[in-house]
Amino acid sequence: MKILVVEDDIDTLTYVARGLGQLGHTVDKVDTGGEGLHMATNSPYDVIVLDRMLPELDGVTILKNIRIAGVKTPVLFLTALDGVNERVEGLDAGADDYLVKPFAFSELAARVHALGRRPVLAKVEPVLKVGDLEMDLRRRQVRRAGRVVELQPQEFKLLEYMMRNAGDVVTRTMLLEHVWDFHFDPKTKIIETHMSRLRSKIDRDADTPLIHTVRGAGYSIHAPD
């Protein structure tokens, strides 16, 4: 799944994002309300984990605004406010679940997974398609021209990110941030190695390649014109 985490406590933000990433999810994380509102209304997500007490905009205000904007992505409130009135206010604002700090990561992950399985509220397409390549996000299965393609978890995340940005150039920096959660260049061949493996699995035995190197810029996945 693609998950947005909005949390101003950097330690909690890093802890949650890293844990969800290790479970194979693609995680975007921001630490202000303004950024959270922008990301939630401009990018498709399967689940949003939203802190209530944030700089710039509080969580309830963000939630009301994204619901007004028509975003139906399931939202899990993550907060230290554990009073009945606070929980009712959050649920009335459009939250789908409510988890009080401190929390066990295993419970948070279970709640996130439960929200991601809700078919009615899930706004994103469960199947991504590029040409004859299909990625079933719920079954975590990839097929090209009907042939099952076996991918390692990191290869799946890499392909999912590229398919969500099909037709666009994704740079090395974008891949490091969104697939590996690196905010620095590790000066290794990690991207090239994974991309080479992914390309051999996706384009092997195919008449036309879908993954392309854009010299001096990055990579792109797109069907033939």
Image (cartoon, rainbow, N blue to C red):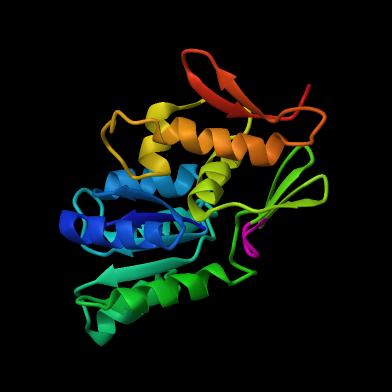
Q: Nearer the viewer, residue 137 or 74?
A: 137
* Res. 83 visible in picture: yes
Q: Which image quadrant is residue 148 in?
A: bottom right
Q: Quadrant of residue 23?
A: bottom left
Does residue 50 belong to the magenta stretch?
A: no
Please tell me in which quadrant of the rendered image residue 190 appears. top left
Query: Magenta region's main secondary structure?
Result: loop
Can the viewer see residue 89?
Answer: no
- Residue 173: x %, y % from top left: 37, 29
Location of residue 9 in the rendering, given as x and y in whole percent from the top left corner: 17, 57
The structure residue drawn at horizontal position 35% and vertical position 74%, both measured from the top left corner, is: 108
Q: Residue at x 34, y 45 (%)?
A: 181
Q: How many marks?
A: 0
Kindly identify the residue that appears in the image at 53 percent across and 34 percent down: 195
Which of the image's four quarters has the C terminus? top right
Residue 7 placement, left or right of 154: left
Residue 155 higher or lower than 209, as above or below: below
Closest to the observer, 12 or 52:
12
Q: Position of residue 220 (x, y in %)?
A: 59, 27
User: Where is residue 12 drawn, in percent x and y?
Assistant: 21, 61
Magenta stretch bounds: 137-141
